[in-house]
Image: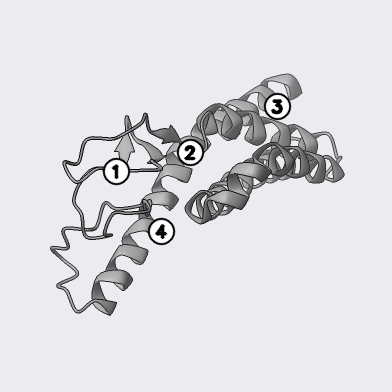
Amino acid sequence: MTALWIAAALLAAGFGGWPVTALVFRLARTIDDKADAAAKGRDTADDPSADVTVDVPGRAPDDDAGQAVNGELTAATGQPASGVPAEPVQRILRGGAIIGVLERLGVCLAILAGQPVAIAYIVAVKGLGRFAELKETPVAAERFIIGTLASMLWAAGIAAAVKVIFLA
């Protein structure tokens, strides 16, 4: 029966955390967009720049050209006046969904195994792997921090609940 609870905890932590993290991202974006719109003196309910999440050099933040490709953050190095990208866009934080699932599985396993120190290794490996990207793109750094915290809190909460309630 213990193995069943551990498997259920891993499934809930690993795959149930994605919607929670997506919700946290949406909430953070909504709060930031409303604050930015209010600072610019716009109506916060109908702000045309609400979906702008990446500042592209050479383009005004109010430009309504898309900043996402298939739901991923993108950044371009140059943008001609016609709005057609001069070079292919660079995806920011590629593979984040897979990394997030693996991170949540690792955090959940570490807590269930009674080895919370392993969480520090997970965060260190994740941070080192993304260091160059995070250093160059402030928006990516912000998404990294928000996503990591939301993801880890979800996984730790599921693991702690299963450990206390079902595996005590």
**Secondary structure at numbered mark 1:** loop
Q: Nearer the viewer, residue 165 or 120?
A: 120
Q: Earlier in the sequence, mark 4 or mark 1?
A: 4
The amino acid type of the residue labelled 1 equals Gln
The amino acid type of the residue labelled 4 equals Ala
**Secondary structure at numbered mark 2:** loop
Camera-nearest label, 2 or 3? 2
Quadrant of the drawing holding the N terminus = top right
Q: Earlier in the sequence, mark 2 or mark 1?
A: 1
- In the picture of the structure, the residue carrying the numbered disc 4 is 28
- The x and y percentages for residue 122 are 75, 38
**Secondary structure at numbered mark 3:** helix
- In the picture of the structure, the residue carrying the numbered disc 1 is 79
Q: Earlier in the sequence, mark 2 or mark 3?
A: 3
Q: Is residue 156 left or right of residue 117?
A: left
Q: Nearer the viewer, residue 92 or 147?
A: 92
Q: Which labelled disc corresponds to residue 6?
A: 3
